[in-house]
Image: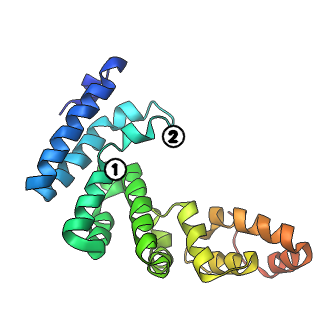
Amino acid sequence: MEFTTSLREEGETWESIATHLGNLQALQQSDLNGAIAYSQQFYADSSEYWSTKPYSADKEARFSGLESILAAVEEQRGLAGLETWVSSIDGEATGLRNYRLEATSRMIAALREESPERAAAWVRANANQGYVAVPDIVAAAEVFADTPEGQVDWIAALPGNANRSALAGPFREFLQEDFDAAGAWLARQTLDPA
């Protein structure tokens, strides 16, 4: 697919993406597995190009077609099928780490739309896998606890190091709400240095 070669000229970026989206749409109607493979290959082929850009730059273009893949998987296989597919993306071995991060975040949003409790449970079970973004961890904590102290407790109890970055926002709120209680909470923690 030589995406990186075709993008050497900046003006060709959107033309290549438009072609990709057309191909993806046609494949989704006849061969969802083929569409998934095509989408992942498109991202992998373009990773050299995107590595020269800030992560937030042209995020829509970077993940072009991912939203329609997620919708097609959910429509054809249900939320359980969506969870299975996203969990099967091998981000480390294939250079699709950011693709998996984005797919995971969007899958969690789909779960949250149907059942916030289900999404939060998924986050709790998978937080240490390295593909759950901080905003998704914080949103899950808000499902299980309605106070900043409860959210901080929930995040701190996550397995592995998933809680490190996610603690910042809720802990700041806890500090603002009750400085003394937040200080006492912090003194009781046995978390290793980040």
Q: Residues within 10 Å of mark 1 (few under 14, many from 20)?
A: some
Q: Which residue is mark 1?
A: 96
Q: Is residue 193 visible?
A: no
Look at 36% across and 51% down and name the residue there. Answer: 99
Quadrant assignment for the C terminus: bottom right
Residue most extreme to the right: 180
Q: Is residue 93 visible?
A: yes
Q: Secondary structure at mark 1?
A: loop
- Image mark for residue 59: none
Q: Position of residue 165 (x, y in %)?
A: 64, 61
Marks 1 and 2, the one that precedes in the sequence:
2
Q: Given the image, on which type of amino acid does mark 2 rest?
A: Ser
Q: Which residue is mark 2?
A: 56
Q: Position of residue 126 (x, y in %)?
A: 45, 73
Look at 43% across and 67% down and name the residue there. Answer: 108
Q: Residues within 10 Å of mark 2 (few under 14, many from 20)?
A: few
Look at 87% across and 79% down and name the residue there. Answer: 181
